[in-house]
């Protein structure tokens, strides 16, 4: 052993090597297990089960793909919505709401009785609720025939599909006004901006807030119309209902055109 | 058949009314009434929501009307800082919030402390500082408490940009007049806020966006918050205005849940604000570490 390497004997060297190995293994683990935010989390087993129903249908149920497109991309000409890359829980909730009896509106009694002396106001502990209602001439009949398992499977199947939007050219004035609504809303009417809930660039956020980008403009307009005339009432705390009631016909067109102009991709690698 | 005078009168009135109806101009697309009609499903809350009439609140200029000159560049920069403070003024922001987290709709929303109502009032005497403060000093206070960071100096370029943006937003607003929509909505406190009821209301209504533990929700790309945290290390500190139970309740009443403002009662808003207040948040930077541990917390939430 020379004078030079006495300060670091073989044991210390081995220790340092082991330490570096642990650090490298940790770094590799963190790198490989990084959450992929541009991918929807789905149950792949359920998704593989749901493929048959989505592409082939069952008995009297037509295949989902016949209207919603072979890859769930929707139909821009006829206004059938895109399903690819939507949150599976969102799709499942919509199917359950489609299947629900529209007369299932009830009265819920607040478990905590209110002190009427301090909170003047009648019927404050009787909340009239709708459990989530969505009218559609085609989808109501289909959803009523689906079982819970089928809804779960088909939702996961569509959540797992990839989608890339094809931005459409839109006139400048619609874009300008649509962007104003998307980024700033109508504060003078206390209407919040779309992207406060639907995510930056309308890409959707979580299971409660569906994407607006990549949906056919006709679909967005028809949904806001349904919110306004009560054919759709299945949101959380009436947030979308109150917001939709503040939109004029021009607003609907502008916002739908604006989002058809956005680029968007999900589940793509 | 005899023609009586009142028949004649009725027909004249009828003709007049048909003429008026037909002379009414065709509604342009922008102002046509929406399809709101009486509905099968009744509203989820039997409370009165104030109806907004056009012209009730000041309307700031549109972003597309920012001038295309050097001033316009600074206005755009100020807007960027305001909307994405984490990216454009990271050295001053100490937590995860942006200016727009509270000043909703880019500082335009009435009763969410809109900039167009604040800017024309400054300099003004402020209780918190016990003296007259300028608009720049007010912004410093925002950075120090609400953003839990380091206040930019009054001559910092970011400060210039924010002031220029505020001045542009209040273009056309009267100077020194307290406009409707300024600051936060009025609230009536009839009893001490009930933190237990606040927890129930929070769990029922706020959890979807702000999370079970008030931690907020991060953006899809993992950078910045989509829904801001209400308490914890990434939220405003004990010196902030929203730390005060009453101020937070005023904000909640008019703005939360987003889009369904005024659906919570005054009492419910106060209860939620008190429930927010009892949780941990960064220390008040005005007093020492030990005083923060031992003394009563500011904000009027009572003893913890």
Image (cartoon, grey):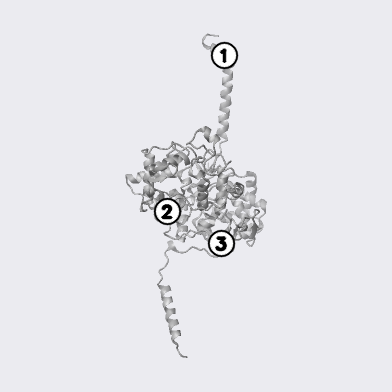
Query: Mark 3 or mark 2, which is nearer the start of the sequence?
Result: 2
| Residue A259 locus on image (x, y percent) | 47, 52
Query: Mark 2 or mark 1, which is nearer the start of the sequence?
Result: 1
Snapshot quadrant of residue A126: bottom right
| Residue B242 locus on image (x, y percent) | 50, 45
Question: Cα distance, mark 2 to mark 3?
Answer: 28 Å
- The residue pinned by badge 3 equals A230
Determine which of the numbered discs, if any, sits on residue B139 in the image: none
Residue B159 placement, left or right of A124: left
Q: Check contact, mark 1 vs mark 2: CB within 8 A.
A: no
Q: In this view of the protein, can residue A86 be seen by the observer? A: no
- Same chain? Circles 2 and 3: yes
Residue B137 placement, left or right of A227: left
- The residue pinned by badge 1 equals A9
- Same chain? Circles 1 and 3: yes
Q: Point out the residue furthest to the bottom here.
A: B1
* Marker count (numbered): 3
Badge 2 density bin: few <14, some 14–19, many ≥20, Cα 10 Å: many
């Amino acid at each position: 052993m020379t004078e030079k390497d006495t300060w670091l004997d073989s044991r210390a060297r081995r220790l340092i090597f082991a330490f570096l190995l642990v650090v490298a293994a940790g770094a590799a683990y963190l790198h490989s297990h990084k959450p992929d935010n541009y991918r929807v989390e789905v149950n792949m087993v359920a998704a593989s089960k749901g493929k048959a129903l989505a592409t082939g249908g069952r008995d009297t149920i037509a295949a989902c793909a016949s209207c919603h497109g072979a890859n769930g991309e929707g139909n821009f000409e006829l206004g059938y919505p895109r399903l690819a890359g939507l949150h599976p829980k969102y799709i499942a909730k919509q199917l359950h709401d489609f299947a629900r009896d529209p007369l299932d509106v009830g009265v819920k009694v607040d478990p905590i009785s209110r002190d009427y002396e301090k909170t003047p106001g009648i019927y404050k502990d009787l909340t009239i609720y709708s459990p989530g209602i969505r009218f559609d001439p085609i989808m109501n009949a289909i959803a009523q025939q689906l079982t819970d398992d089928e809804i779960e499977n088909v939702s996961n199947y569509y959540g797992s599909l990839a989608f890339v939007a094809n931005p459409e050219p839109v006139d400048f004035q619609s874009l300008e006004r649509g962007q104003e609504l998307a980024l700033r809303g109508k504060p003078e009417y206390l209407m919040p901006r779309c992207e406060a809930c639907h995510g930056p660039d309308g890409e959707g956020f979580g299971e409660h807030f569906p994407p607006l980008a990549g949906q056919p403009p006709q679909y967005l307009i028809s949904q806001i119309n349904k919110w306004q005339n009560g054919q759709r009432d299945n949101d959380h705390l009436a947030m979308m209902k109150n917001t939709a009631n503040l939109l004029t016909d021009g607003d609907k067109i502008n916002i739908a055109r604006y989002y058809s102009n956005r680029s968007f991709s999900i589940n793509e690698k | 058949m005899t023609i009586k005078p009142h028949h004649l009168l009725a027909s004249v009135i009828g003709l007049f009314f048909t003429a008026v109806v037909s002379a009414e101009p065709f509604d342009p697309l922008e102002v046509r009434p929406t399809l709101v009609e009486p509905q099968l499903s009744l509203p989820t809350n039997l409370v009165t929501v104030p109806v907004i009439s056009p012209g009730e609140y000041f309307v700031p200029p549109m972003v597309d009307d920012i001038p295309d000159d050097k001033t316009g560049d600074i206005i755009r920069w100020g807007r960027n800082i305001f909307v994405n403070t984490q990216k454009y003024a990271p050295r001053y922001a100490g937590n995860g919030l942006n200016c727009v987290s509270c000043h909703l709709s880019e500082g335009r929303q009435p009763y969410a402390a809109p900039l167009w109502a604040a800017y024309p009032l400054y300099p003004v005497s402020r209780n918190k500082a016990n003296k007259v403060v300028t608009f720049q000093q007010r912004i410093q206070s925002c950075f120090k408490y609400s953003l839990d960071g380091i206040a930019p100096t009054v001559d910092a370029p970011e400060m210039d940009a924010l002031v220029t943006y505020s001045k542009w937003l209040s273009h056309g607003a009267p100077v020194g007049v307290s406009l409707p929509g300024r600051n936060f909505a009025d609230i009536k406190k009839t009893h001490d806020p009930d933190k237990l009821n606040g927890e129930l209301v929070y769990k029922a209504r706020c959890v979807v966006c702000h999370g079970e533990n008030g931690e907020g929700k991060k953006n899809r790309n993992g950078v910045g918050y989509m829904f801001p945290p209400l308490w914890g290390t990434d939220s405003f500190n004990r010196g902030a205005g929203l730390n005060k139970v009453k101020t937070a309740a005023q904000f909640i009443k008019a703005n939360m849940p987003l889009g369904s403002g005024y659906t919570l009662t005054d009492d419910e808003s106060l209860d939620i604000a008190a429930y927010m207040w009892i949780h941990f948040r960064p220390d008040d930077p005005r007093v020492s570490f030990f005083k923060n541990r031992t003394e009563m917390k500011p904000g009027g939430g009572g003893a913890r």
